[in-house]
Amino acid sequence: MITEHIMKTHQLYPEKWVDLYADYLFNYAVARISDADLAKDLVQETFFAGLKSAKNYKGEATERTWLIAILKRKVIDHYRKINSKKGKAEVRINYSSSSDSEGDWLEEQVADPFSTLENGVLENEELGIAIQECIGKLPKKQALVFTMKTIQNISTEDICNDLEINPSNLWVMIHRARTSLMDCLNKNWF
Amino acid sequence: MISCEEAATICSKTQYKEASFIEKMRLSFHIFICKTCSKFSKNNKHLSSLCEKAKLHTLTEAEKVEMKENIKSEI
């Protein structure tokens, strides 16, 4: 049980987690697990684990960084579980072939989302994070319409029915969202 | 001739290939004349290609609602 006191002291807002971070965490997980259902479960587990260890949150990292660290561990655990299922044959690889690594275990081999390595995959991932962050800054309805249309590829008609708006409303919202996104991404990606 | 605002909305529509033939004609005419919209159109296309390149995934609204409820019940 998490007391209100703890929440206030360390500035965690679990009731906002889904809106703020679910897509971001989900992208991170999908990129590493490539199984959407499983990725979704890991995100949910991450939120639960976050609640459970909220008292350990010292406010040193942002809420997002803190959650991604938890998810990272979940992803590692997932691969460990698969590996142990594969049988008892233990494969030992010398991870520390490069001298600058401190330990010799798997954790440090997981891609760091904040790394600036000039690598295509990582760059696309950074791009994804940047877009996701910018979408997060949009007014909620614009973000929803843009996401449905652009990322989930839902037809205009279905979105209009779903949200009870007319097509010209939809296009105005899409247009505003796109304009804000261009501004938001401007610094690094345009 | 259409206004810049109209042109911009049509331009966003074309990113989803949903502008009508007439709209497209109007837009290209406008872009031919208007430098600002021409630049906007270019950026808009670039945004589309960025979104595609990033291969974004999202949870559906229903999935998010479910997650929220799960979290609520744990707090």
Image: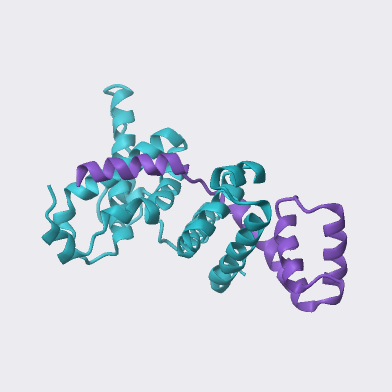
For the residue pair A181 and A38, the one nearer the viewer reads as A181
**Vertical order, B64 against A68 (above or below):** above
Task: Please indicate, yes or no, whether residue A75 appears anywhere in the rendered image.
Answer: no
For the residue pair A129 and A83, the one nearer the viewer reads as A129
For the residue pair A60 and A116, the one nearer the viewer reads as A60
A53 on left or right of B41: left
Place of residue B27 in the rendered image (x, y in percent of width and height, measured from the top left): 82, 64
Place of residue A112 in the rendered image (x, y in percent of width and height, measured from the top left): 38, 55
Residue B45 sits in quarter: bottom right
Visual colour scheme: by chain
Letter of the chain in cyan: A
Q: Colour of chain B?
A: purple
Residue A49 sits in quarter: top left
**Vertical order, A115 against B3 (above or below):** above
Place of residue A11 in the rendered image (x, y in percent of width and height, measured from the top left): 22, 64
The residue lying at 21 percent from left, 43 percent from top is B74
A137 on left or right of A168: left
The residue lying at 59 percent from left, 43 percent from top is A161
**Vertical order, A92 against A50 (above or below):** above
The residue lying at 75 percent from left, 61 percent from top is B10
For the residue pair A159 and A82, the one nearer the viewer reads as A159
Task: Please indicate, yes or no, whether residue B35 appears anywhere in the rendered image.
Answer: yes
Q: How many marks?
A: 0
Q: Quadrant of the N terminus of chain B?
A: bottom right
The residue lying at 66 percent from left, 46 percent from top is A156
